[in-house]
Amino acid sequence: MSLCVDLKSSGWIFPTILLSLYGFLANCRPAEPFLTPYLIGPKNISETLVTNYLFPIWTYSYLAVLPVVFLLTDLLRYKPVIVLHGLFLVSNYVLLCFAPGLTAMTFLQFNYAVVTSTEVAYFSYIYSVIPTEHFQLATGYVRSAVLSGLTFGATLGQLLISLAGVSYFMINAITLGLMASAFIVSLFLPMPKMGMFFSPTVACADPLEERREVPEIGLRAKAKSDRWSKDNLKTAARKMWANLKESYSSRRLVYWSLWWALATANYCQVINYIQLMWDHIEPSSTSSVFNGAVEAVCTLVGFAAVFSVGYMRVRWEIWGELFLGVFSAVGAVSVFFIGLTSNIWISYSCYIIFKATYMLLITITTFQIASNLSMECYALTFGLNTFVAIALQTVLTAAVVDNTGLGLDITFQFIIYGGCYGVISVLFLLRGIYTAFTHHSTHTGGNTHSIHPPHTQINTTTVTNKHTQKLSTKL
């Protein structure tokens, strides 16, 4: 008992432990790598319906729900949205376990859109309940819990299927139990006192009213009714607009945000449809499925890539865009091979390479965007970039996947995704070469007129590396 009291009195350890536990349980989903085989097999839904009808519904729903959830997250002060996230995770696997038919699976896609859109509250919550000096350490614990949950869940699912011969239904039932545990943990999270943009305010009382004896309950009711006044909403809107202008005032930041949106749109398409691609290459009914093992390896390799960013001594303001272009080319080639190969092991390997390069580049991009912004600006920029990415993904889904558009089969879809990644690569290779050449020309031409003497030159590499180490821990 005394230990619990000590943890609560610490101010940051207790919420960090609870949030980390929630993150581990909520992301420990043994059934997720086997969703497509489950829908096509036991649920008896055709591959065409899953590809061209069901999965696009998630994309459209995500785009519709995300802006509302993003505003409500701050307005409701994070915890209610995390609880909602846990509740919809539970309902997600209740539907998968017990709801038959195409109609239920159609609603499942909307349900999962709520799950993915409410994830924003998880990574924002910690900054509203702990002191600033503990941000780095707490974020490291929270991110590690998520990665641990993803790895453990994928590994457990693979072991249960490959070694124990557990059915897809039982895997989903086990996942349902884990999601129920996560929901229970979310109920015990402390409630933050305020959000980043919407701060609870009470209207100024009339001096004459202060002399009257008003029951305490009446005062509380009045304070509650005045809390979210029109002035408060106007203040939040002005703060958001000011933060947006600050965030996008830098041309370089706009370029990094552009890569974020374009690459994330294509990345989401690849990870959404990769199980369908694998089932197309080698149907699950004729061989063992190793989706869980591949996802576990992806998480570990991605974690190593993210961790390595903290030790890269690169002048990102000069070489960053070229770096994006080169590794985007690696991603493009990997996606092309996924779409063109008929060997499942080549497809698995290319997917691991693709996912690792994306996690590496999104970490660097996030660092570049966040290193010179306040937490409020970063949160807003993250939300807007994510919304643009989902909007682009929606356009891509409507044009390429949906039956109302081209309705292409899974092979041609991946060829198009690889082509889109190729375009991103060319754009940033050209931009990176221009940036590096301009810097070299300016540096060479103005070397004799340097503002700083040689012994007082600023060590930008050290400064950049210090910021990178801080952000890599956050991610």
Image (cartoon, rainbow, N blue to C red):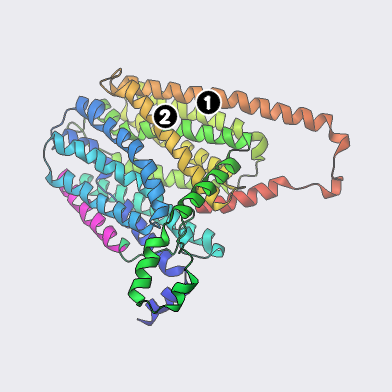
Cα distance, mark 1 to mark 2?
17 Å
Q: Residue at x 46, y 47 (%)?
A: 303
Residue range highlighted in magenta: 163-185
List x then y, in percent, for residue 166: 16, 47
Q: Residues within 10 Å of mark 1 (few under 14, many from 20)?
A: many
Check disc 2 and report the residue beneath it.
392
Above or below: residue 288 compared with residue 407: below
Name the residue located 32 percent from the left edge and 43 percent from the top edge. 293
359 or 376: which is nearer to us?
A: 376
The residue type indicated by label 2 comes to: Leu
Position of 10 with respect to 155 (left or right) is right
The image position of residue 235, as x and y in percent, is 51, 52
Q: Secondary structure at mark 1?
A: helix
The answer, for residue 166, to whether it is visible in the render is no
What residue type is disc 1 on? Ser
Q: Is residue 88 left or right of residue 202?
A: left
Instruction: Give me the residue at 29% from left, 53% from top.
Output: 84
Is the N terminus in the top left, top right, bottom left or bottom right quadrant? bottom left
Where is residue 411? Give x, y as percent.
Answer: 32, 21
Q: Which mark is residue 425?
A: 1
Q: Position of residue 170 (x, y in %)?
A: 16, 49
Assign a secondary structure to mark 2: helix
- Majority secondary structure in the magenta region: helix
